[in-house]
Image (cartoon, helix red, strand yellow):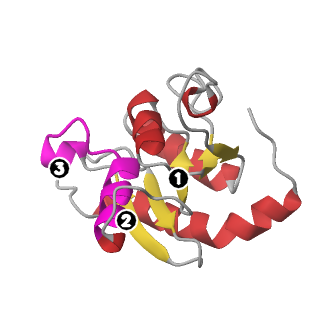
């Protein structure tokens, strides 16, 4: 796992706020009494100038698509905005540590940095359970900055799963 200094937390505080807003959208946008809410995970892609060029939140329940994770939604939008599948110079900011599928997509998109709110001790693939993005056998390396607004990110998930029990 990676432990950033205070400067990293400050630098990414606002971007994580946008990711948290996206996570809230998973709860609000498509919830009806007869329909499940998606797990509230949000992500944004920030370009080298600090502009948000991609946004996403989980939409698996809404779209019936197992790949509709927040990270993939944000990566797809960012690639469309810049007109290239290579997101070199961009940063992915996400409320929960990415899974193996999303970690693979991060590498394939050549994203050099990810910022994580909360760790995923069950399925995380960027430093907790696995560390796909920093595996020396891979052809690309991604920096991991963790624990940015951790309490808020974790609480959103805790509240969601508590309400379902």
Q: Secondary structure at mark 2?
A: helix
Q: Using the numbered discs, state the Cα–Cα distance from disc 2 to disc 1 in whole angstroms.
A: 14 Å
Q: Residue shown at 78%/60% (left/top)?
A: 8
Q: Which residues are magenta?
A: 60-80
Counting from the top left corner in percent of width and height, residue 120 is at: 57, 32
Q: Is residue 86 magenta?
A: no
In the rendered image, which residue does mark 2 sit on?
78
In the rendered image, which residue does mark 1 sit on?
94
Q: Is residue 135 above or below residue 148?
A: above
The answer to whether the residue labelled 3 contacts the one labelled 2, judged by CB atoms less than 8 Å apart, is no
The C terminus lies in quadrant = top left
Q: Using the numbered discs, state the Cα–Cα distance from disc 3 to disc 2 in whole angstroms.
A: 21 Å
Mark 2 Cα-neighbour bin, 10 Å: few <14, some 14–19, many ≥20: many
Viewer-proximal residue among 157 and 98: 98
User: Which label was assigned to residue 165?
Assistant: none
Viewer-proximal residue among 56 and 29: 56
Q: Using the numbered discs, state the Cα–Cα distance from disc 3 to disc 1 in whole angstroms.
A: 20 Å
Q: Earlier in the sequence, mark 3 or mark 2?
A: 3
Q: Residue shown at 61%/39% (left/top)?
A: 141
């Amino acid at each position: 796992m990676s432990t950033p200094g205070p400067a990293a937390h400050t630098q990414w505080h606002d971007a994580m706020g946008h990711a948290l807003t996206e996570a809230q959208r998973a709860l609000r946008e498509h919830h009806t009494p007869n329909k499940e809410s998606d797990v509230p995970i949000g992500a944004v892609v920030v370009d080298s100038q600090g502009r948000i060029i991609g946004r996403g939140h989980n939409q698996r329940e809404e779209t019936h698509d197992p790949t509709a994770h927040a990270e993939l939604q944000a990566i797809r939008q960012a690639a469309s905005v810049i007109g290239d599948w290579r997101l070199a110079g961009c940063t992915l900011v996400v409320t929960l540590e990415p899974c193996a599928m999303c970690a693979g997509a991060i590498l394939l998109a050549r994203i050099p940095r990810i910022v994580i709110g909360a760790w995923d001790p069950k399925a995380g693939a960027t430093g907790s359970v696995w560390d796909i993005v920093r595996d020396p056998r891979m052809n690309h390396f991604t920096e991991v900055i963790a624990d940015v607004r951790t309490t808020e990110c974790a609480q959103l998930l805790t509240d969601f799963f508590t309400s379902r029990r």
